Amino acid sequence: MPGPSTELVQQLYRTPPDRFVAARDAAVADARRAGDPSTARQLARLRRPTVAAWLVNLLAIRRPELVADLVELADELRTAQRELRGPRLRELSAQRRAVVGALVAEVRKLAAAEPDAPPAGRLPLAEVEATLNAAFSDAEVAEQVRAGRLLRAASYAGFGEVPRPQLRLVTGDDEEPEEERPARRPGAQRARPEPATRADRAAPGMDRAASRKDRAAERAEQAERAAQRAARAERARQRRALDRELALAQADQKRVEAELTEATGQERDGVAVLDGIEAELAELERRRAVAEQDLSRAKLARRAAERAVTVARRRAGEVEGAIEALAAEEGDADGGAGAAD
């Protein structure tokens, strides 16, 4: 089995550290379901990076061209350090500071684009900067940075991968004493002194070369100290900028907290007003119910009265009819009696 693909591994190392284990375990489960136990084992061996290492990996995966420039410049810088080329070393050291500063700024931008990244004030940018500086001095660290699989931040106390050579300035007092000459035989001709050897003739040139190397090494150390001072100054500048940003953020926090307090008071007042209105509505509803009941009773009474009126009118009509009929009968009776008389 070929193992996990480069894209899958890069996807895992792009994942923020707090979600790395879950993403890795999901990839392991997928490989097992696909019948690939070798890939599953290799994925299970991947370890979660620290936040600083994750940021460096994110830089290597998102912006590989910038990391490639860093690795190339690191090779040139280590070569200049080994060869003790002072002017070139100073030039490359200045480039190193500029490159590291630009890469740290790019890391900040990449982190801001990640939804699950820590806030800007909590990013371990100092560890990122230390790791990038270590990549200039350690080829192995540079390769880990380029691969985008760094597990933890790196640091380097000194500068350069070759220690300062142990040089010794040769003086006249250090010359070895001449071998004791054999006793001259009486009458023998005085022996001519031996001619100077090639090593004797080359000694002054070697002394000068050693002095030049010593001075070059000292200049390299001075350049490194200057680079460290510049790095400290840059960190101090960044700290001041962060302090200003923190002051602005705290001022904004106080302002929005005051707005929140005011809005909370307004909300509380609004709730009280609404409660009062709802109480009034409840009272009005009660009164409305009572009025509706009274109205219903009045309607019932009106209808009963209307029915009683109707009955009374009908009864009065009937009585009036009976009276009229009785009167008619009486008139007829009176007329018949008069005719009989």
Image (cartoon, rainbow, N blue to C red):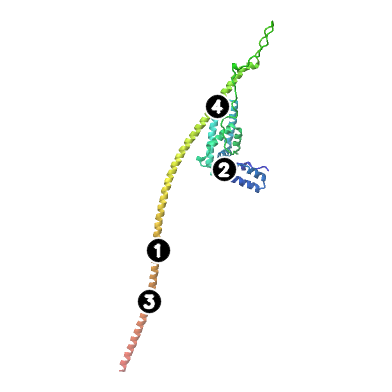
Query: What amino acid is found at the position of numbered circle 1 in the picture?
Result: Arg
Q: Is 287 located above or below residue 313 in the figure?
A: above
> What x and y, as percent, mark residue 192?
67, 9
Mark 1 lies on a secondary structure that is helix
Label 2 neighbourhood size at 10 Å, few (<14), some (14-19), many (20+)? many
> What x and y, as percent, mark residue 90?
55, 27
Of marks 1 and 2, the one in the foreground: 2
Structural distance between the alpha carbons of marks 2 and 3: 92 Å
Check contact, mark 2 vs mark 4: CB within 8 A. no
According to the picture, the residue beneath numbered tag 3 turns out to be 308
According to the picture, the residue beneath numbered tag 1 turns out to be 286
Tell me which label, 2 or 4, sits earlier in the chain.
Answer: 2
Query: Which residue is depicted at the point 67% across and 45% down?
Result: 37
Check contact, mark 3 vs mark 4: CB within 8 A. no
Q: Which residue is the extreme one toward the top? A: 187
Which label belongs to residue 221? 4
> What x and y, as percent, mark residue 262?
41, 48
Query: What amino acid is found at the position of numbered circle 2 in the picture?
Result: Pro
Query: Which residue is depicted at the point 55% across and 24% down?
Result: 218
Tell me which label, 3 or 4, sits earlier in the chain.
Answer: 4
Q: Quadrant of residue 4?
A: top right
Q: Quadrant of residue 251?
A: top left
Structural distance between the alpha carbons of marks 3 and 4: 125 Å
Structural distance between the alpha carbons of marks 1 and 2: 63 Å
Label 3 neighbourhood size at 10 Å, few (<14), some (14-19), many (20+)? few
Query: What amino acid is found at the position of numbered circle 4 in the picture?
Result: Glu
According to the picture, the residue beneath numbered tag 2 turns out to be 17
Tell me which label, 2 or 3, sits earlier in the chain.
Answer: 2
Of marks 1 and 3, the one in the foreground: 1
